[in-house]
Image: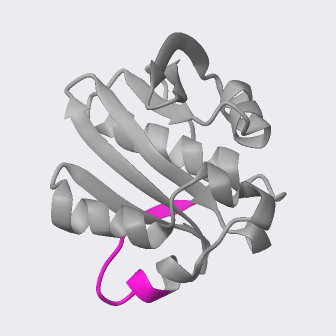
Amino acid sequence: MRLEPVTEDNYRAVIGLEVHEEQRSFVATNLKSIADAWIHRPRMQPLALFSGEELVGFTLLERDRPEALHIVRFMIDRRAQGRGLGRKGLAAIADVARSEGRTELVLSVVPGNAVARGLYVAFGFTDTGEVDGGELVMRHELAPSAHLADQ
């Protein structure tokens, strides 16, 4: 799994990614996420997720604290779900955080999004007890040894 910046060359394809119908109420559109990053929030970085040459997902990262990398948005395209790519995408994000000297990943999840929450818990995220904008905040402490994003 590799992460690449969303650019003028690939943003249309990234905008075309979508989750399953029943997941749409849990995540903002990629168009909104890219607009947030490019127009409103310069600390945010929109990234395309690739498995080999296939565009399979999108993430929006924010560097709001020196020790943490905040995963603002994370999605795997409906056509690529069920192939273990969510875990690989999280591992690639963890590798980025480690390479920047960060010690934790932080994200929030809509309470009813059991599939995403299950993925995050399986990856090692734990509930913090905090709620942000109605979403449950989760944290993952990064071990010094890197996960390999290609596993």
Q: Is residue 140 above or below residue 107?
A: above
Instruction: Report how many numbered discs are placed on residues in the image.
Output: 0
Spot occupied by residue 67 in the image (x, y as percentages of width and height): 26, 22
Asked whether residue 149 appears in the rendered view, the answer is no
Image quadrant where residue 122 sits? top right
Give percent across and percent down for residue 117.
Answer: 70, 33
Residue 139 image point, x, y percent: 50, 21
Which residue is more in the foreground, 18 or 55? 18
The reply, left or right, for residue 70 in relation to residue 16 is: left
Can residue 22 be seen here? The reply is yes
Q: Residue at x 48, y 33 (%)?
A: 107
- Tell me if residue 5 comes above or below residue 107 in the rendering: below
Q: Position of residue 105 (x, y in %)?
A: 43, 29
Q: Is residue 39 left or right of residue 18?
A: left
| Residue 83 vertical position relative to residue 53 in the rendered view, above or below | above
> Could you tell me which residue is drawn at 51 percent across and 58 percent down?
28
Q: How is the image coloured?
A: one colour
**What residue is shown at x 73% (from left), y 35% (from top)?**
112
Q: Quadrant of residue 120?
A: top right
Stretch in magenta: 1-12
Residue placed most toward the observer, 39 or 14: 39
